[in-house]
Image (spheres, rainbow, N blue to C red):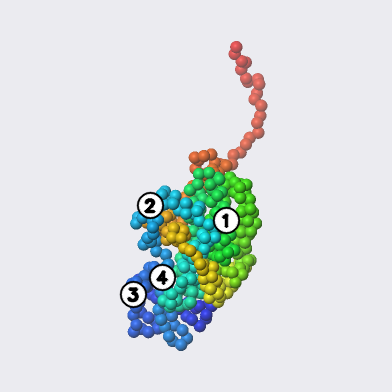
Amino acid sequence: MVYQDPVSPNMVYQDPVNHNNVYQDPINHNTVYQDPEQVSQDSVAFLYQDLSGNSYTAVRRSALWPTRYRSRLLPGENQPLDVGLLRRVKEVLEGVEPRTAAQHITRADCMVAGIVEVRVEDQRRMGVASGVELLTLAHGHQLRLDLLERYQTMSVVLAVFILGCTGSPEERAALLHKAIQIAAQLKSSMGNMFGFSAVMRALELPQVARLKQTWTVLRQRYTECSVLYQHNLRPFLKALDQGKESTQLTGTSFPHIIPLLLLLERRTALGEGAWQAEGSGVDAVMSHLTAARTIAQLGRIYCANADIKIMGLREQAEVSEVFQTDFQTRLLWGSGGAGQDPAQRYAKYHSVLTTLSHHLEPPRHLPPGAPQTLTPCPPQTLTPWTPPDTDSLEPPRH
């Protein structure tokens, strides 16, 4: 299969026949490649040929490898949603300042995306200077999947802590307050629209949005934060998803790419409708595709902005680990389930979040303990009431 670069039409890509077996260079039939460490299930290899006839091989490895991730917080083997680990992570989230959390999230986002600390070797393998440019290219498939994985995992982790690690509406409102503050810092101070979208998506999930008691407490105790969320952050995210809002180039470290990722990876990335971005009309699609070309052309500027935003960051080891995708994957699915297919993993957690949400605030039309789905009763035909015949009634016995 041959692909043409939508940004640079002079570059053509040739997909190898099989990533796992020996394959032959279609440009030079005397050259055969066999590198199991570079060409594997965790990487995507492409053979390039420019108009001058020069060709080379580039490999984009996945930046995520949760099954081999090790940290001071994680044991060698862990169970999904380990209670002690959840308690420790909650303490870290409650103790970190919103701006510090936003800086750590931005650094982790940009590391996965190949925006900061990109080595010359990585540039050679990508074929471009940064991951921002790679996003729109054919061999950016693995990078797009990595970013979608990070986006979903961050959203699920935050939702789990809001729904499953709190005992009262006041505790949940406090976590909502912290999450909204982090989202505001990602939007304004960091210019990280990717991280902003991930945090906001956790708050927009139906399982979280339906908690009326929690949101009422938020409005009462954190009125200013509630107003910021309802009248600033939510409309801004909706406008971004619909392609009606653009960010300033000078202050943006990571542009809003979620709709583009969903468009390019629609077949393989997401199965749940709850994860899909709003505004899938023709105008929105054209707007996102136009923005993709601009993003690729301005990749170096975003990289420079990201370097400035995270400059001077005093990295805190535990905070950094909490916002790593590999750590979050191990936290949610354990060491045994971290390597399973993402679509199956997230489909299961959609049901888990729904169960947790209904446990906290049971739906009004269902009594506590009732099944979550009800079968509607068939319509019944009512007959008019007629009084009984008094002559046929027996007299009362005394």
Of residues 255 and 15, the one drawn nearer to the viewer in this rendering: 255
CA gap, disc 2 and disc 3: 34 Å
3D distance between C-alphas at marks 1 and 2 = 29 Å
Name the N-terminal-most of marks 1 and 2. Answer: 2
Element type at mark 2: loop
Identity of the amino acid at label 3?
Asp
CB-based contact (under 8 Å), mark 1 and mark 4:
no
The residue at which mark 4 appears reads as 61
The disc label shown at residue 180, or none:
1
* Residue 310 circle label: none
Mark 1 or 4, nearer chain start: 4
- Dividing the picture into quadrants, the one containing residue 181 is bottom right
Q: Nearer the viewer, residue 261 or 391?
A: 261
Residue 2 in the image, given as x and y percentages of width and height: 46, 77
Disc 4 marks a residue whose amino acid type is: Arg
Q: CA distance from mark 3 to mark 1?
A: 46 Å
Tell me which corner region of the image, top left, top right, bottom left or bottom right, holds residue 240: bottom right
The residue located at (62%, 52%) in the rendering is 226
Q: Residues within 10 Å of mark 3 (few under 14, many from 20)?
A: few
Q: Position of residue 347 (x, y in %)?
A: 46, 55
Q: Quadrant of the C terminus?
A: top right
Q: Earlier in the sequence, mark 3 or mark 4?
A: 3
Instruction: Assess disc 4: are there few (<14), some (14-19) or many (≥20) residues with their C-alpha within 10 Å of its C-alpha.
Output: many
Residue of label 3:
35
Residue displayed at 46% across by 84% down:
50
Residue beneath the point at 61% across and 56% down: 229
Q: Secondary structure at mark 4?
A: strand
Residue beneath label 2, please? 79
Please say if the residues under marks 2 and 4 sit with CB atoms less than 8 Å apart.
Answer: no
